[in-house]
Amino acid sequence: NAGVTQTPKFQVLKTGQSMTLQCAQDMNHEYMSWYRQDPGMGLRLIHYSVGAGITDQGEVPNGYNVSRSTTEDFPLRLLSAAPSQTSVYFCASSPGTGGGGYTFGSGTRLTVV
Amino acid sequence: AQRVTQPEKLLSVFKGAPVELKCNYSYSGSPELFWYVQYSRQRLQLLLRHISRESIKGFTADLNKGETSFHLKKPFAQEEDSAMYYCALSGWGGSNYKLTFGKGTLLTVNP
């Protein structure tokens, strides 16, 4: 039982490049979310999913796309990277209300130059 | 709209002293409240949730609906408690079940 696995752990992109941050969970959780963590800002929700095939926008969705074709995977796509997207990205999953909260991955540290 | 406020960015105490990390929330309904801890550049770990009423690592938190607060307390702080603490809330079920975080409090426990 690996929990929530994020890849890569570190990434450097040039402005304008695109990439996909991978997130996979093996706990059969329905709910999955992506957050970005910036100094002094806490964690802000980018996109979330309440089940396979269902996604919705969070607080800061601009510049990011998601899809949820399976229960296990929830990739985050950066369409055209900008320096403002330099951040640490966390993926999380949960079985739902009363199920014990969200379990977080170890994060992806992204730098856009 | 749901909002979590942690008024202290930094909190510094000495080992053995009591510690209280404040959290206030705004939510139209009955939220589920959590405390998460993040040790130096590691992943967030769930510390407490209000519905379980557990005590983890000596920490407790009581939901006060009248004051809309969920303060985290520990009677005797330890050096290993030094970390970033985040208060978070979610609604119940469906699209309401997404976490909103406060901006965090960095706790430093001095020897």
Image (spheres, helix red, strand yellow):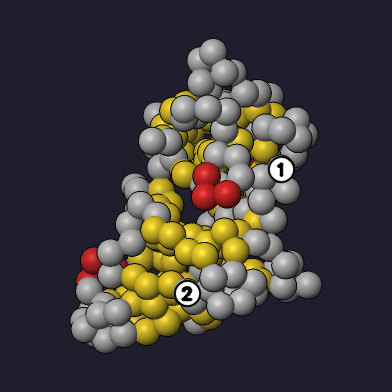
Q: Chain of mark 2?
A: A
Residue at the image position 65 percent from the left and 61 percent from the top: A30
* Whether residue B6 can be seen here: no
Estimate the x, y position of residue B10 in percent, counting from the top left.
42, 36
Query: In this rendering, is residue B62 above or below A1?
Result: above
Along the line of sight, the residue nearer the viewer: B82 or A14:
A14
Q: Amino acid at mark 2?
A: Ser
Q: Which mark is residue A98?
A: 1
Estimate the x, y position of residue A107 in percent, counting from the top left.
51, 68
Q: Chain of mark 1?
A: A
Which residue sits furthest top?
A: B66
Tell me which label, 1 or 2, sits earlier in the chain.
Answer: 2
Residue at the image position 64 percent from the left and 72 percent from the top: A71
Which residue sits furthest front?
A: A53
* Whether residue A42 can be seen here: yes
Residue at label 2? A67
Query: In this rendering, is residue A12 above or below A93?
Result: below
Residue at the image position 44 percent from the left and 66 percent from the top: A89
Query: In this rendering, is residue A19 above or below A38?
Result: below
